[in-house]
Image (tube, helix red, strand yellow):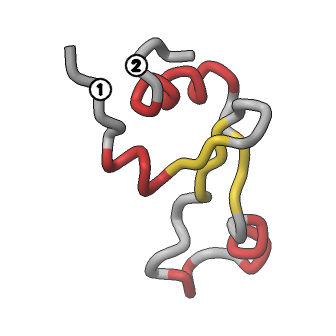
Amino acid sequence: MPKMKTKSSAKKRFKLTGTGKVKGNVAFKRHCLSAKSQKMKRQARGTFVLFKTDGDNVKKYFLPNGG
């Protein structure tokens, strides 16, 4: 049986931390930025850690057994 491949879309959008949590990028910061508040744009910098249930769903794309 061949190995399962990692989903390319997940590979580009998410990273796994050393403890197994999933990091992602904050959305809504590509265009129409003049309509968004300075606070929202400032808080959207960098990355954030997904909630556990969302992270478990994303991990299924990285690891075949989800784990």
Name the residue: 42% across, 56% down: 12
**Is 39 positioned to the left or the right of 10 in the image?**
right
Q: Residue furthest left?
A: 1
Q: Residue at x 43, y 49 (%)?
A: 11
Q: Is residue 14 left or right of residue 18?
A: left
The quadrant where residue 39 appears: bottom right
Q: Residue at x 54, y 72 (%)?
A: 29
Camera-side residue of 15 and 43:
15
Horizontal arrangement in the rendering, residue 60 relative to residue 15 (left or right): left
Q: Position of residue 1 (x, y in %)?
A: 20, 13
Looking at the image, residue 26 lies above or below residue 23: below
Residue 42: percent from left, percent from top = 77, 74
Report the label total.
2
Are the residues tagged 1 and 2 within 8 Å (C-beta)?
yes
Mark 2 neighbour class, 10 Å CA radius: few under 14, some 14 to 19, many 20 or more: few
Which three-letter amino acid code belongs to the residue tagged 1? Met
Q: Secondary structure at mark 2?
A: loop
Q: Residue furthest bottom?
A: 34
At mark 1, the secondary structure is loop
Alpha carbons under labels 1 and 2: distance apart: 6 Å
Task: Count residues near mark 1 (Cα–Cα under 10 Å), then give few for <14, some for 14-19, many for 20+.
Answer: few
Question: Which one is nearer the viewer's eye here, 27 or 50?
Answer: 50
Which residue was labeled with disc 1?
4
Amino acid type at mark 2: Pro
Q: Quadrant of residue 10?
A: top left
Q: Any mark on residue 64, and which? A: 2
Looking at the image, which residue is at 40% across and 19% down? 64
In the image shown, does 36 or 53 lie closer to the viewer? 53
